[in-house]
Image (cartoon, helix red, strand yellow):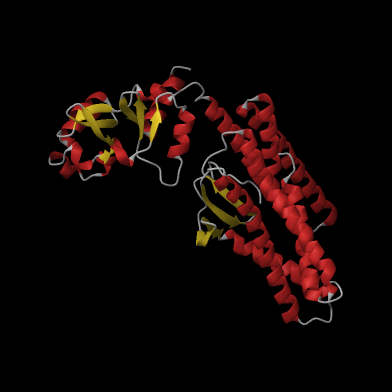
Amino acid sequence: MIPYRVRKPWGHGMRSTIRFGKIFGIPVGINSSWFLVIALITFLLQSQFSLEFPRWTLVQTWSLAGVTGLLFFGSVLAHELAHSVVATARGIPVRGITLFVFGGVSNISHEAKRPWVEFIIAFAGPLLSMVLGGVLLGVSWVMFPLNDSIYIAALTLGWTNLALGIFNLLPGFPLDGGRVLRAIIWGTTGNYHVATNIAARIGQGLAVSIILGSVIWFILSGELLRLWPLLIGMFLFSAATSALSEVRERQRYRDVTAKHVALASCTAVDCSILLSEVVERHVLGQGQTCFLVCDGEAPVGIVPLKIIRDMPKAGWITTTLGQVMATLDELPEMEQDTDVSELLDVFEDDNPPIAILLSSDNGIVGAVTPLDIDRYMKTRRDLGM
């Protein structure tokens, strides 16, 4: 419901999430906070239905409230599925969808590479919500004289879906409307970072407006539930601020390619050398953290420091690099002029590789690990670059 893409600090996944299967091949889960919200929504709906239908029994009002509440989150799930299905169709993997306290999020593996792709992914969710809202309002109109239960459920869900679609089209990042705005600015200026900065700043302003409006509403009404938008505003402000931080972080990688990072990366070492010797000579002696394993002149695998570190130290004196290496066909391959930001997208995947191979016209020339990127960028910071 809020963003369709979740990056750090929450992009690595939500804790306390129960996975219950896949829809269209996309994993779907429920965060524990969802149960609290569905209980609250059910209670509020039951109170409303009791007032509108005083002759109904408690069983009738509670049953309709429960079904309507579940269908509401089904609508949120449909909204997120629209984002995810379009992203998958454009070749962008989707890690999963999670329903949580503020609605739902689609965790898409990386940002779109073109503005028009981001536009259609972002717009798909609100469009489906508004279409679904129109269909449900039509159902309520047809059922008005025939069935009170279907009428009231369809009417409630119809207006809710319309509100969901319209709210998400507000032009502030990370809402879908903010992503649509970013796509438009990105396509117009050709500058992704400028577009993100503008959309996120507007998102912060929108969040502050929601927070202030919620507080004023609470003061005027005295009803505690009027503070619920305050939590949404705080969530949006945090997400917009994180987006700005990420833009600044990504700006640091501007003009840095895999070739630059690889200058201090994997060292070519023969496959027959023992791990104990590698640690003594290359790790402790030279500070190397990644090794391109060679059989004669030909590279055959990669051993990052993490593999050695995770092994029992007693095995270092009997184990060779060739015995613990990841073979080249197990690892992704990229050109030397690939932007470091693209490497980071690969390493942020749910199943990240231990290294990325770097190639040229003459074949494999080295590899890069996340540690290499961190060390290179730290050196740049230390030098004031």
**Residue 175 seen by the camera:** no
User: Which residue extends farthest left?
Assistant: 318
Whether residue 150 is situated above or below residue 384 in the rendered picture: below
Which x, y percent locates residue 94? 52, 48
In the rendered image, the vertical position of residue 272 relative to residue 349, given as above or below: above
Count of numbered circles on the image: 0
Q: Nearer the viewer, residue 332 or 12?
A: 332
Q: At 56% from the left edge and 38% from the top edge, which residue is drawn?
A: 111
Residue shown at the point (20%, 26%) measured from the top left: 297
**Residue at the right extreme?**
145
Relative image position of residue 348 (x, y in whole percent): 46, 40
Q: Position of residue 168 (x, y in %)?
A: 71, 47
Q: Residue at x 83, y 77 (%)?
A: 146
Q: Nearer the viewer, residue 273 or 58?
A: 273
**Residue 317 at what x, y percent from top left?**
13, 39
Q: Can residue 82 be seen here?
A: yes
Q: Quadrant of residue 51?
A: bottom right
- 325 vs 83, left or right, is left
Question: Relative to residue 193, is residue 153 drawn left or right?
Answer: right
Farthest front residue? 361
Between 283 and 27, the one lying in front of the other is 27
Q: Quadrant of residue 72?
A: bottom right
